[in-house]
Amino acid sequence: MTRGTRAIAFGTALLAGGCSRAAPDPVRALLAELETAAEDRDAGRFAGRLSDTFQGQENVTKAAAEAELRRYFAAYESIGIELYEVEVERPEGSARVRCQVAFSGHARRAFGLENLLPPSALYRFDLEARDEGGTWRVTRARWEKIEGPPAS
């Protein structure tokens, strides 16, 4: 291998290894994983990104949140999620995230669910997350339904 060929091979290896790219933001990666899990209607995967000490509104635990998500996801054939106005504050080793979440979905056509479940909704979320052994998880969540179109 010539010197020039070795340099090209070395440069290509560095680029392929991601050395030239910044590391992905772990908080944005957490949000993307939650969004994908919801759209895939995968309650177990979603709950896997909740801390064991998770505290939701009205003292909802991780186990209760997962059970509710399973029921909710089962009621829909498809779910779409869009995040808007994402704001992230980063105290040491943790993060506070505020965002709007636009939900859309097609309810299953069984037991009249298509007439009971909303095809769309908009929520404001306030989340706290932290790094737990190299994996970012949501530790606290509060939300409220809001009216009108999402802010962009």
Image (cartoon, grey):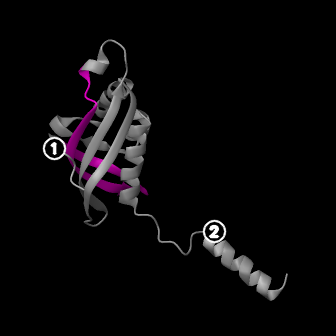
Q: Which element type, helix, strand or loop, lies under badge 1?
A: loop
Q: Main secondary structure of the magenta part?
A: strand
131 in the magenta segment: yes
Highlighted range, magenta: 116-143
Q: Is residue 104 magenta?
A: no
- Crowding around mark 2 (Cα neighbors within 10 Å: few <14, some 14 to 19, many 20+) is few
Decide which of 93, 15 is in the foreground and name it: 15
Three-letter code, disc 1: Gly
Q: Is residue 133 visible?
A: no
- If the image is split into quadrants, where does the C terminus sit? bottom left
Q: Which mark is residue 90?
A: none
Q: Is residue 20 visible?
A: yes
Is residue 115 found left or right of 36 in the rendered image? left
* Left or right: residue 136 compared with residue 12: left
Q: Amino acid at mark 2?
A: Ala
Residue 16's label in the rendered image is 2
User: Which residue position is annotated with label 1?
Assistant: 148
Image height check: is 59 above or below 20?
A: above
Residue 59 horizontal/vertical position (percent): 18, 36
Name the quarter where the N terminus is drawn: bottom right
- Residue drawn at (84%, 85%) of the image: 2
